[in-house]
Image (cartoon, rainbow, N blue to C red):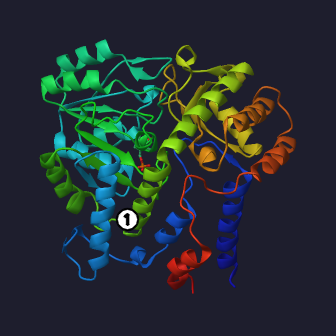
Amino acid sequence: MSEDLEAILSLIERHNEWRGRECINLIASENVTSPLVNAVYLSDAMHRYAEGLPFKRFYQGTRYIDELEVRASKLFASLFEAGYADLRPISGTIANATVFTAFGKAGEAAAVLPLSGGAHVSHSEYGILGRLGLKPVQMPIIRDELIPDVDEAVSLIRKASPKLVVLGASVIIFPHPVKEIAEASEEVGAKLIFDAAHVLGLIAGGVYPNPLKEGAHLITTSTHKTFPGPQGGAILTNSEEIYRKVSRLVFPVFVSNHHLHRLAALGVAALELREYGRDYAGQIVRNARRLAEALCERGFKVLGEGKGFTRTHQVLLDVRGDGGGDRCARKLEEANIIVNKNILPWDDPSEIRNLSGIRIGVQEVTRLGMKEGDMDEVAEFIYQVVKLGKDAEEVRRRVMEFRKGFTRVHYAFEASSERIGKLTKLLLS
Ligand SMILES: Cc1ncc(COP(=O)(O)O)c(C=O)c1O
């Protein structure tokens, strides 16, 4: 075996062991897929092309893929009580790019949240929205809650007459006021887009309001954060006209082939949420709240305290008094606790070395079976590293021991090893 080959194999083995077995992963934008999702993902479909829409492809050989895509899209639509779902965008950013292109033109205004108020970079001047020449106008936010200030947002929308209004965010601890902002968007003829990348699994589980029911015209999303699917994107809407317009842009403008092995995996993940979504999403929010309380009890400054800290999977810490986000995140990594430094409303987006926040998400540890009592232990590990400055190696040893109790993916179908073997046999022999 060549040295390069050996290095590649051992790097990925090491990665799998470390991130998959030895760390407490609290990155809010990640998750783990179930064995059955993994088994259908690892399929011959990953080798194939299917440009266009089901049964109207540019390639032959897609008869099963066509049926799969129709079925998975229907499942997705029904899970979110939407009329239409397009699963072809290969990421959340591509879903946003498609929708922004469909409904905005260079020079037109788009009402968005500020980056320091939680918006994703694709909603900003630095991302695809800006690159398309759209002019972001920023809706002010309530700082401690990271939600738009309704009165100010409504008056801005009336004044700026944007073509697009974008809600939903990367940093989100409370539901956004979709209903109130939908009325103002309607008045000026803007399309209201809710970017559900972070909260999609919570919507499926009924613990976060469904934006389509509150007046959003479209949902754009990733499929791998609280929604425990393969990495990718999707667009949902109730309007046939919007669906047709968007779907004519997904292909041929934003994807050629849409990574077909995602389709069966998305279908299985949607079924897992249909079956177990309520328990899963309810436990996520209970865990997030308990973790926030436990951190607050240990002297951390946790955002949203006045409203019970969080109603999502996220917990936000202001660690300015603990050396800042960058320093805390690095120290925690040494102890195998993985979080990211994050911008908070008072930070300057261009000063990425100097951010005051830590963003925590509990969706992955919830899927691995952690409950409220375990959140106390997680808070204690974080406290020992950040506040007490305990030796990272000592905490790491205890984190690894603790992590041994959480190796199985919950809220997922049991599949026999024969079935998993049958599904993956072709590719693994
Ligand atoms: C709100 C939001 N939208 C879009 C995206 C982009 O998703 P993707 O990484 O799938 O392109 C993210 C990613 O973190 C996000 O947080």
Say which element carries label 1. helix
> Which residue is at a point 76% across and 44% down the rendered structure image?
334
Classify the position of the C terminus by image quarter.
Answer: bottom right
Q: Give the amino acid type for the residue marked by disc 1 in the picture.
A: Leu
- According to the picture, the residue beneath numbered tag 1 turns out to be 263
Location of residue 85 with respect to 58 vertically, above or below: above
For label 1, being within 8 Å of ligand 1 is answered no
In which quadrant of the rendered view does residue 356 lie? top right
Residue closer to the observer: 258 or 8: 258
Residue 338 appears at what percent x and percent y?
A: 66, 44
Location of residue 44 with respect to 316 vertically, above or below: below
> Which residue is at a point 29% across and 38% down the rendered structure image?
130
Residue closer to the observer: 25 or 366: 366
Q: Is residue 87 visible?
A: no
Residue 206 appears at what percent x and percent y?
A: 42, 38
> Which residue is at a point 75% across and 22% down the rendered structure image?
298
> Which residue is at a point 67% across and 61% down the rendered structure image?
15
- Taking the image as shown, residue 337 lies to the left or right of residue 176, namely right
Q: Is residue 109 visible?
A: yes
- Taking the image as shown, residue 110 lies to the left or right of residue 305, namely left
